Amino acid sequence: MPKPSYPQPVPTPRSRPSSKDVAQLAGVSTATVSRALNSPDALDPDTLARVRAAAAKLRYVPHGGARSLRSQRTRMIGAVVPSVEYALYARTTSAVHQRVSARGYSLVLAEHHYDLDAELRVTSQLVQHGVDAFVFVGLDHHPGLFSLLDDYGRPYVLTWGVDPLRRHPSVGFDNHAAAYQVTRHLTDLGHRRIGLLSAPLQGNDRGMARGAGMRAALADAGLELDPRHVQYAPIHLDTAEEAMMTLISAPDRPTAVVATNDIFAVGGMVACRKAGLRIPQDMSITGIDNTDLGATQTPGLTSVRTPIIEIGHAAAEQLMARLEGKDYEAFQSFPIEVVYRGSTAAPEYD
């Protein structure tokens, strides 16, 4: 069955509230509104609070330099990511850049460190500076983000997941299935005590989906995740190593660990070597994303190949099509695949 294609007229900025509207609602002059936005210390707290409340109610964002452009088009696309330090987000963003730059667009990069309020704030600033369209990571965002983008007629696409309710254009893969498949691999090998290494879940729907996929696979095998066998840590090798050391020292330690990305998995492998545990004889470890970091370990890391480059290319093509009034595919889900290597085996003891 062919996938639906969505015709998209060239978006034009909608009639947006002005500083005069804010001034009328707040009961002040437009000069006071300007001072509130540019020199807030010059106003008394009560007046400043009234202006900010009025601006928030109207969802007013000053349009900045883009107002002077006759077309109000800058050919800038914004990529707002959780962290530029995480290599996989950087690779997806690079893939976006490759496609848009080849067509004369510029990419503007910003990060929010898993803080959805910060994501809304930085996106508002980019709208103010005339950014035409946006790429975001993940499916869960501040409700005000979509209101802002809708009010200002800014096309956007969510990446690294596909909206199951088909509310927001999205390009990605099934994070739940990724963790389910590697966990099922471990239960099929005979593991019964399986631990979890994950990033913190606040503002991180990818981590939540992967944790849920692991739990679902355990439930299908008649097992449960022992709370003592779960560790959350920032995405770094050293923090992953520390978290794995905690799992190793836990009562009835796991015989296998599902890491929600390859960095956690490799950090876990380092911890096992330092603790004198053999991989996979004493501890099986799996990752997700199938990076070179995991593939070049000894033994190589069993992981899930995810379409991080394909996501970036598809997101770029969708946004450019929408900006240019061409047909586009609003929802794209790419396949994943478990890559089996030497880091997993049946447990030698239970």
Image: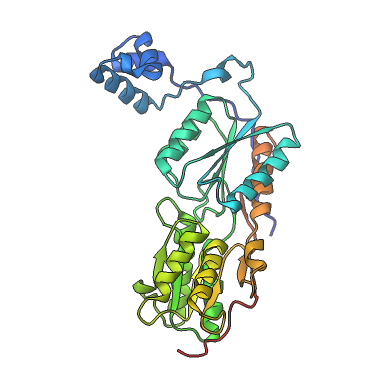
Residue placed furthest toward the left: 46
Quadrant of the frame with the N terminus: bottom right
Pick whichever, 281 or 287, lies toward us: 281
Side (left or right) of 309 relative to 243: right
- Whether residue 38 sits left or right of residue 343 in the image: it is left
> Residue at the spot x=54%, y=71% of the render?
269
Q: For the C terminus, give its image quadrant.
A: bottom left
Question: Looking at the picture, how far across and down is residue 83, in whole percent?
Answer: 52, 46
Label tally: 0
By what rule are the colours in the image chosen? Answer: rainbow
Vertical order, 58 against 100 (above or below): above
Q: Does residue 328 appear anywhere in the picture?
A: no
Q: Left or right: 95 with respect to 287?
A: right
Residue at position x 43%, y 20% in the image: 17
Residue at (54% x, 30% y) in the render: 153
Where is residue 35? Give x, y as percent.
Answer: 37, 14
Quarter of the view holding residue 71 = top right
Q: Residue 13 or 199: which is nearer the viewer?
A: 199
Instruction: Name the residue at the bottom extreme.
Output: 349
Front in this rendered view, residue 328 or 205: 205
Quadrant of res 157:
top right
Give the percent coordinates (x, y) of residue 282.
51, 83
Residue 251: in sight, yes or no? yes
Residue 177: x %, y % from top left: 54, 67
Q: Give 32 or 71, whichever is nearer the viewer.
A: 32
